Image (tube, grey):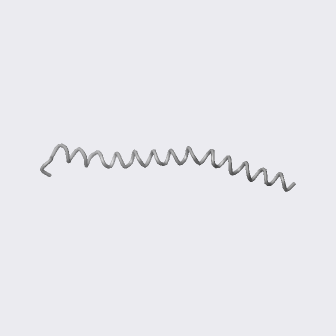
Amino acid sequence: MKNVYRFLALSEIYWFKDLALPIFVTMIGFTMVGLTLRAVPRFLITVTRPEA
């Protein structure tokens, strides 16, 4: 019976690892998009008005 619990715990860890990678990548993707969206207006203002 102890082996069954150990197997369940291991499969839980592997399942979490399989799930955690896409979530991690998605979070990084959303962060990159958010930073880009925040940086673009500032960049456009700098480009269109160099004197500012």
How many numbered markers are drawn? Answer: 0
On the image, the x and y values in percent for residue 32 come to: 41, 47
Please tell me which residue is depicted at 65% across the width and 49% down the height of the picture. 16
Name the residue furthest right: 1
| Quadrant housing residue 44 | top left
Q: In this view, does 50 lie to the left or right of 37?
A: left
Please tell me which residue is depicted at 14% across the width and 47% down the height of the picture. 50
Name the residue furthest bottom: 2
On the image, the x and y values in percent for residue 18 come to: 63, 44
On the image, the x and y values in percent for residue 49 come to: 15, 46
Quarter holding the N terminus is bottom right
On the image, the x and y values in percent for residue 21 come to: 57, 46
Please tell me which residue is depicted at 26% across the width and 46% down the height of the picture. 41
Q: Is residue 29 left or right of residue 22?
A: left
Please tell me which residue is depicted at 78% across the width and 50% down the height of the picture. 7
Name the residue furthest left: 51
